[in-house]
Amino acid sequence: MSNLRKLLDLDYHDRFLLCQSLLLLPLVGLMLKLLGFRRSGNILTHLVIRKSRLWDNQVESRLMKARRAAWLISVASVWGAYRANCLERSLALWCVLGRLGIESQIFFGARKVDGKLDAHAWVELDHHDT
């Protein structure tokens, strides 16, 4: 199935989440540049407190919902106007999952490769990489 066909076949909830991601990713990027990680995280924490009931009537497991949200955020990052890095995508996913009532954690890893710092951020739910 082509990517365009997958997008056209999205249900209402997925389309809403995709639109939300298209707006959230550049906002997170701007917040990180202007405010830094700590303040941006505090602001996103306040957004997470108001949990949405999006997807509550579906029977999908939390892990399936988290993977679906991660996929939609990746789609927004690749096909949207703003190309988010892994930290921006992880913060956006963490915020979206929190609003869906799904607890998750952001993890960071770093190493030096050939004298250059190589860093990565990701989100885990019950120790499953999303």
Image (cartoon, rainbow, N blue to C red):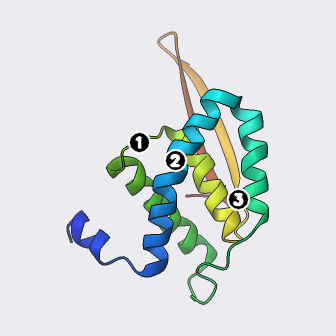
The residue type indicated by label 3 comes to Ser
Task: Look at the numbered discs 2 and 1 and tell me whether their residues touch, using CB distance below 8 Å.
Answer: yes
Count of numbered circles on the image: 3
Q: Residues within 10 Å of mark 2 (few under 14, many from 20)?
A: many
Is 57 displayed left or right of 40 in the figure? left
Q: CA distance from mark 3 to mark 2?
A: 18 Å
The residue type indicated by label 2 comes to Leu
Decide which of tag 3 and tag 1 comes sooner along the chain.
Answer: 1
Q: Position of residue 94 (x, y in %)?
A: 65, 55
Find disc 3 in the rendering and name its residue: 104
Q: Is residue 77 positioned above or below 48 on the image?
A: above
Is 73 displayed left or right of 96 in the figure? left
Q: Position of residue 73 (x, y in %)?
A: 47, 56
Q: For the C terminus, which image quadrant? A: bottom right
Residue 102: quadrant of the picture = bottom right
Q: Is residue 30 positioned above or below 11 on the image?
A: above
Find disc 2 in the rendering and name its residue: 25
Q: Secondary structure at mark 2?
A: helix
The residue lying at 70 percent from left, 33 percent from top is 37
Q: Secondary structure at mark 3?
A: loop
